[in-house]
Amino acid sequence: MASAVATTASSPQAYLRSLARWKPIEIAFWLATLLPFALVPNYLSLASQIAIAGLFALSLDLILGYAGIVSLGHAAFFGIGAYTAGIISKYGWGEPISGLMASAALAGLVGWTTSFIIARFRHLALIMLTLGFGLLLAELANSMSWLTGGVDGLQGIHTWDLLGLFHFDLYGFTAYAYSLTVLFILFIVARRLINSPFGLALRGIRENWIRMPAIGAPSRAHIRAIYTIAAAMAGTAGALLAQTTETVSLDSLSFERSAELLVMLVLGGAGRLYGGLVGAIIFMVARDQFSGTTPQYWYFWIGVLLVAVVTLLPNGILGGLSNIAARWRKT
Amino acid sequence: MKHVLRAATVLAAASMLAGSAAAQGTIKIGLILPYSGQFADTATQIDNGIKLYLKQHGDTVAGKKIEIIRKDAGGINPPVAKRLAQELVTRDAVDILAGFALTPNALAAADVSAEAKKFMVDMNAATAIVTTKSPYMVRTSFTVPQLNQTLGTWAVQRGIKNAYTMVTDYGPGIDAESAFDKGFKAAGGEIVGSVRMAVANPDFSAYVQRAKDLNPQGIFIMIPGGAQPGAFGKALAERGIDPKKTKVMGQMEITDEHALAAMGDVAIGMITAGHYDYNHKSKLNEEFVKAYNAEFKRNPDFFSVGGYDGMHLIFAALAKTKGNADGQVLVDAAKGLTWDSPRGPMAIDPETRDVVQNVYIRRVEKVDGKLVNVEIATIPNVKDPFKAAMKK
Amino acid sequence: MLPPIFGVLFDGFAYGMLLFLLSVGQSVTLGMMNFINLAHCSFAMLGGYVTVLLVNRYGWPFFAALPIAFLAAALASVAFERTLYRRLYRASDLDQVLLTIGITFISVAAAAYIFTTAQQPLQLPAYLRGSLSFMGLDFAVYRLILIGIALAITALLVACLEYTRFGAKIRAAVDNERMARGLGIDVDRAFALTFALGSGLAGLGGALAIEIVGLDPSFAFTYLVYVLIVVSVGGLGSIGGSFAAAAVLGISDIAGKYYVPQLGAFLIYLVMVGLLMWRPAGLFGKR
Amino acid sequence: MTRPALLTRGLSKSFGSLVVARDIAISLPVGARYALIGPNGAGKTTLINLMTGMLAPDAGRIFLGDDDITNFDPRERVRRGLARTFQINTLFPGLTPLEAVTLAVCERRGISREFWRNIASHREAIDEAHDILSRLRLAEECYRPTRELPYGRQRLLEIALALATRPKVLLLDEPAAGVPPEESGEIFEVVAGLSDDLTLLFIEHDMHVVFRFASHIIVLVGGAIYTEGTPAEISAHPGVREVYLGTRRHG
């Protein structure tokens, strides 16, 4: 795609601008996200949870796909967001939007604090440290059951009507509209960020960590910044789940959630804004369908799906598809 | 915008009503269980109980065909459980929600039951407060205090004057600890120490050593079923604690069939409180076990009987309402129902909608070369003590 | 009379050896071949099921079942290596993660289908389940056996991989595949053999672990975290490192649970985080 | 005499018993074109790593102009005008040369933390990057991902990235390493055409190239300076012929 653009670009500036331009397929994608309202109104709860998973995957993509930080503990921020929103609501303030912001702020604060450690490590040590922090936090939440409700989950969450107008209904109508809107807004933020000088610096870190200091780049400061942003975004996703389902439990912090998130992102294709969204859609729809038909053995089919994607479409679905498209164009 | 929203909601509601109208002659039950993951076996056993009941009694009651839609919650996952419950109600137009192996999932789905006014049958989740979350819910399993507070009282009456408690540091463990403490202290016993153990814990030797250091007359334990009871039993044997001398007590899962096989002879003498075991001596149970084995080639356990009795309750209530599946009508019909179950006499408390049943105190013995739980005492018709205390 | 601390140290060391046996295969595949095999515990689970089947159903002696568990996992892994894994030796880490997680999912479902979801308790003879008294302390027989086997495997692996031609070939093949081929080393075979060795060790580890940790289809996921912890703390590619890491983690976990049970659940993770912050490449890590 | 652009004094480093740098004193005058030669394992790359802060010396001091930079981290040295290239390509394979050089320019200009405006709106930075690429004859290929560029082009991009930091002193670690002889000339012509204000130190094995482009040659053997001097002095030095030039002819 880049080469096709290059020949027509009149100046380097125009070339870079063209890379960031909205493409028709992107607009089509976002229009398609509105289809569930009309086509499958009975699936809006699922659609809402997919949008939340997509937002969560997008937040991981910012650090993994763009800055090359593999995290197995990203659920920590999701959980912090979820518990913050839940606890605020439990103690009497169920207004969703302010709750969302408070959750994002707290998750971001924790992300910023831990980023000072995270930014010092690479490779396996980094993965294991994120995993370790995640597990420690999950244990902490379990032992602080006076605050979190422990294994039984937090009880007594009530989310007020959105904007004082829209009740969170049983059909998930409001939930999906709300989650989708938040996802879209944060997607725009992420998209701008990726196309900014800062986004370029992040890709530099991913592409070559060693070269960065040799061109005078403060990689650690960059990593701290993006880690904080990703944490806040993950916290927002967690808060959305807490508010739309009015439940929070320890699973929101668990290793399984972090691992599942990684699977979704890699399945869709890391390092591509839409990778996490596509991965979340495919993974969650596949799971919903497989587990609907064979509740006991759906793991098998999900496994087959993953193996098939890796062997047929390396670098995730989007990565594989763009490779195929590039090869096809060359011939 | 608001109008559009309302219109869409109405539309969706209309389509749902149309759905249930089309299914005039059927009653749909949405079954939410953790079919995959760590608790898959619990789900399997509950579902087996349900399948057996349907096989024995057919799938029609009061002229209605019973249709079951199964959903996998995949372990402890309340948001998913709640969504599945929502979808079952809105998309599949189910009349009854059932299953629920795990308390957090049951609590989440209870919101849906309350909001949509759907009858809900908790076939396993055992935390006392679960049934308070929806006025349309009944329970056919047991409650943690029902077993453990009863056990605490019984232990003191049998001369165990001091005890050490060891529970896993999670909801059911903490509930069991406080229930046992309550029963034990009220009867005059003394708790000499306690420890809360890590949830992910493949090795118990350190904790057992702590208990041994204090040399109590009794040890009360509460750990999740599955792999841990076996590991716990081994730690007892290795640290030289003999359940024949130090009374090791707990809730029934620590001496279930698989746990006993894993522990071996060290389990002999362990005392547990339970509401069901496949060795319970009654004609009804013998038939049940036989039929169960014929169908699934394994013995039923307390999960199975929760599912079996859950189905019975649904059938009995529907028979009483002549097929009316309205949540309020069904729950009213369910209140006060009594029947004979493989576990013994059983009833639904009309006030709390919770299960009333016999609590059996059992001791592990070797009978014909096989380790089994032998009932040594029966405390009849026990209500959930937690709710009794709440009322006061 | 020995003070109880010796008992705690013994239990901790034995627990560490259990972790070591479960992880050492991963240390071989991840450490030597640089391949992220998250399906490691699936091979361990296979070893476990083979053992249960042979011992419980066919009445084999436990020790006779162990080599079969090793072989079964090794053979199964060769089949996977030939068909799936080898395509991804040079793929990105993330693709390796996705493939092996997929295989783990499949193995979990397959185990549930074939062996049901029930716990599979191993029926061992009484002499393996008792304990020996020595100076007032009880030493469990099974734990002594675990320690013995762990020590033997460490010695054997260090000898094989660091002092034999086979070991040199593998290291050459991993360090510079093209040069190794140029030197006439059959790289494909070296990789397949290493992979089989790693998976076989996983099978053996699984067979030895189930007596303590139990066995059901979720096994393939449950112990993955412990395996990753041991391998990363030990340092990639170092058998000795894994051994030391497992011992440190096991002892601190058991000692922590004994002396400060309030921290029981946190300890193994705290130790891991602390050790990795101190030595990011692991205790004996080179890279 | 004005202060040298880069000065090291008593620089030493060893790994265990292996001494890789022994009491090294180098002085690069402003605008110099110095070559660093020596047999494999002489410690040439190590010396560059010490100067740029990628390795910490055991002893000795490093001055950049008036500043003692011994304790500065690599990034701070770059900001003060000490840049380097790498013997083995250390590029950004997935970025295009335009993106990579723009990144370096943005870092220097201090706008790399700006996350809201599109990169394309930073016209000056982009033009500067394109200008550097043009000077290094990379303009035509600046829209292709780096990993697709021919090897020789990638070597030039190494230099372009370093230039984007606007260095006062540039350390080139075998800029033409691995490039066929017919292409290496192009690379050195580019190097020779760089501004006279820029102080250069390059490592190179090809003696023809060294004698053609260097004004001064430092010979490193076993981690220590064996000798240094003008190309004429070095080519006449009997010891150098023996330990280095002699073996190279056959090696």
Image (cartoon, rainbow, N blue to C red):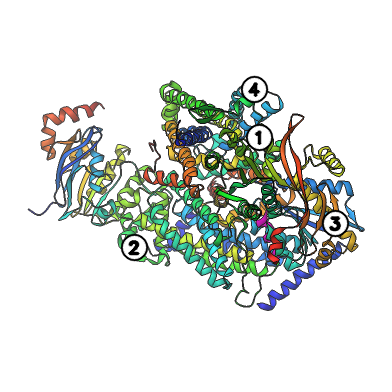
> The disc labelled 1 sits on which kind of residue?
Ala
Label 3 in the same subunit as label 1: yes
Mark 4 lies on a secondary structure that is loop
> Is residue C3 or residue B134 the one in the foreground?
C3
| Residue mark closest to the camera, 3 vs 1 | 3
> The disc labelled 4 sits on which kind of residue?
Pro
| Residue mark closest to the camera, 1 vs 4 | 1
Residue B82 vertical placement versus C91 (above, below): below
User: What's the magenta region?
Assistant: B102-111
- Position of residue A151 measured from the top left corner of the image (x, y, whole percent): 60, 55
**Mark 3–mark 4 distance (CA, rounded to whole Å):** 51 Å
* Earlier-in-chain disc, 3 versus 1: 1
Which of the numbered marks, if any, corresponds to residue D125? 2
Judge from the rendering whether residue C7 lies leftward or rightward of residue B248; answer left or right: left
Bin the neighbour count of mark 4 within 10 Å (Cα to Cα): few under 14, some 14-19, many 20 and up. Answer: some
Do tag 3 and tag 4 residues touch (Cβ < 8 Å)? no
**Mark 1–mark 4 distance (CA, rounded to whole Å):** 17 Å
**Residue under numbered circle 3:** B338
**Mark 2–mark 4 distance (CA, rounded to whole Å):** 75 Å
Chain under label 2? Answer: D
Label 1 in the same subunit as label 4: no
> The disc labelled 3 sits on which kind of residue?
Thr
Q: Quadrant of residue A36?
A: bottom right
Instruction: Decide whether the magenta segment is chiefly helix, strand or loop.
Output: helix
Q: Is residue A259 visible?
A: no
**Residue under numbered circle 4:** C61
- Position of residue B249 measured from the top left corner of the image (x, y, whole percent): 65, 44
Q: Residue furthest right?
A: B63
| Residue mark closest to the camera, 2 vs 4 | 4
**Residue under numbered circle 1:** B262
Question: Quarter of the image containing the C terminus of chain D?
Answer: top left
